[in-house]
Image (spheres, rainbow, N blue to C red):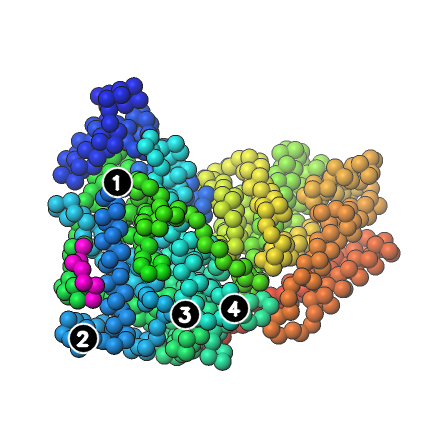
Amino acid sequence: MTIEPATDPATDPATDPVADYRRAVAAFRAGRSGYDELLDSPLGLRVEDAITRPGLDARLVDAQRILGEDGVAGEWQLDPIPLVLGHDEWLELSRGVAQRVELLDAVLADVYGERTLLRDGLLPPEVVLGDPEFIPAAAGIRLPGRHQLFLAAVDVGRDENGDWTVIADRAQAPAGAGYAMANRRATSRLLPGYHPDGRPSRVGGFFDVMRSSLDRVAPPTGGRTPRVVVLTAGPGSETEFDQAYLATLLGFPLVTADDLRVRGGRVWVRDIAGPEPVDVIVRRVDAQWCDPLELRPDSLLGVAGLVEAARRGTVTIVNGLGSGVVENRALYPFLPDICESLLGQRLRLRQVVADSGASTAPVVTDAGLVPARVTLRTFAVTAGSGYEVMAGGLVRMDSGVLKDLWVRGEDLVEGRGRPLGSRPTTALLPTPVISARAGMSMFWLGRYAERAEDTVRLLRVADDLVEDWSGSPGSAGAGALLAIVAAIPLVTGAWPGALGTAGDPHPLLRAMTVDTELAGSVAHAVTRAVAAAHAVREQLSVDTWIVLGSLERVLVEHADSAAAGERIPLGLIYARLLEGLLALAGLKAESMVRDHAWQFLEIGRRVERALQVLALLRATLVQVRDPGVDEVVLEAVLATGESIITHRRRHPAGPAARAHVSSVVDLLLTDAGNPRSVAYSVDRIGEAIVHLPAAESDATSLVDLHAPLTARLRAWQRSDGPVTELDTVLAGLHADVSALAAALQTRYAVAAGSHRPLGDATRWPR
């Protein structure tokens, strides 16, 4: 629908935008469809932009684009119009949420402690002991400090009277805090300059409070700064982004069960330098799956011995094992009396047993603005003597769309007089943990990013040859085109049968560009690079996701046309892809700290570049051809290796004869000053591996494996051997680089089968 305003608030001073917005929302709550009064809301959107269909559609597209730039394209849909709550309304709601979490914490402590509630008849035993989330093995395990419920989420909705009511409690491993922060980032970029009477309260400070609280719940460390990790179910979890983003916001490593082990009654993380002690685990795996010894024996997601370590008090697990027992709605009828008994207070928030709620809010759809039912997820974390409630939250519409929540008013922690953003001072860890799994993910991120770039360069050169020589059969250029086309599967490893014939090179180039299923293609490399990046999201900057998102969009935009056999603008695609890939390389070169994660990324890039150049030289320079064809082939090789300008400066006459193959080899193989040469990559690999720590099982030194590479290169450089020996030299170098890469993986990769199930896994945790 298109709504035409009666007045323009930008020119009508009598218009109260806040009142207009509230009246419009009230109209939705009452079931009316009119939205004439939503003219200029606290969002600061002008009428012609915010209300008209084109404006709404544009903002909806922008919202998804911004999410894509953060690396979450397709994971959820963000409505561009946030839900706005006034300060007084939020203060009342947040007090109710804090009280409820305090109550759930008291119930949780009693259930796994003295169980006075059961003995005194305030809580029927069957409600607790019959709950599948009750874990007898967790009895007696206590977190240091006052609270046993570290983090909780409370889902609320409005009733028919407009009052907030509790729909559900989340205490198992509450999800959504990361989503809430991502939504805030997106709407802040989507709607700059909003709120004529003040910006919404910040939500980032909530994670500062959480980080400080994690330090406080750690077991005694003898003065050492506690080491905290976030335990994830790994790739494939339905809340994978939320878990990774939470780890990023907290600044702690994201680990899987394979990264952890229990030895001597305590938990260790498999750092690349060897095992490091873990003091606090932020658990994002359902409790029943956390330990195959004492809980589910079929779990592939748990760490054998974890319960015993928690029982000994050598590690703190939050939320604690068994905390999901307070999610049971069967508790609801008893909570008012329990609140009076334990807290001496009346329960502030009414609760409903069924998932219901009458509140609605505007949501942008293909039909324009329409009302949709709202559920708000609030978050609370332990903060010393009480609980801190996030001044925001996750708004879910019944259509599955998410909204940001804007809370208007003072950006202060209630009762403390300090901004939420004031971060507590803590000591730095001596060496941040990077697990073997994370190190290998960085290594493969580097390899796939470099593979994509090198393949684009090769395909771009082939496309240029098509444009220049495809209409000149029998010419030297046409012969060179056939040679380069034939080299593509040899260099990239793509299955030749999948590429068609060389009669029309366009299908080959098209498939090698956008076919994600074709191993060796650009799209395949980009897809694998994005997957590797997701595995180490907490290690990467936001800018990295902007670049990766742009690469994916370029390929997706043309995938359908390519699948239909249509010709696509390859030259334009290659230019856009190179722009993104060079930006990615620039981020790695100029924006990353030279820590162990960077070393793995650097080695991955250099290994791949060396292998790609070696494969290119073997596929193009060892054959004997007509001198005219040879000249064009050599120029194509130099262009692919981004070295043609340097070669022209050094050899003005150009590669006019077979003898000039040696000049190309010198530049791309042995010239240690050329960033595109094999020698340069080998030198950088050598510099990086000496910074890597020794692994737990140290076999042949990586430095020892690196030595033959430099020796073979120097031997060729000294002898300047004949071209007939070139293939042997290139093959040997390729084998040496491959062996070094394989040894690196063997040394630092997590040992397969370290966690074996005692039965078959039956489900993935929620």
Q: Along the line of sight, which residue is nearer the eye, 292 or 203?
A: 203
Q: Residues within 10 Å of mark 4 (few under 14, many from 20)?
A: few
The mark that comes first in sequence, 4 or 3, is: 4
SS for dot 2: helix
Look at mark 1 in the image and give the residue it sits on: 86
Left or right: where 36 falls relative to 193: left
Q: How crowded is mark 2: few (under 14 residues within 10 Å), some or many (20 or more)?
A: some
The Cα atoms of the two marked residues, 1 and 3, are separated by 38 Å
Residue drawn at x 53%, y 35% is 569
Disc 3 marks a residue whose amino acid type is Thr
Outermost residue toward the top in this view: 11
Q: Is residue 78 above or below residue 447?
A: above
The Cα atoms of the two marked residues, 2 and 4, are separated by 40 Å
Is 347 one of the magenta-colored residues?
A: yes
The mark that comes first in sequence, 3 or 2, is: 2
Outermost residue toward the right in this view: 719
**Disc number lying in front (1 or 4):** 4
Residue drawn at x 40%, y 66% is 217
The mark that comes first in sequence, 2 or 1, is: 1
Disc 1 marks a residue whose amino acid type is Gly
Residue 166 percent coordinates (x, y): 20, 55
Is 751 one of the magenta-colored residues?
A: no
The mark that comes first in sequence, 1 or 4, is: 1
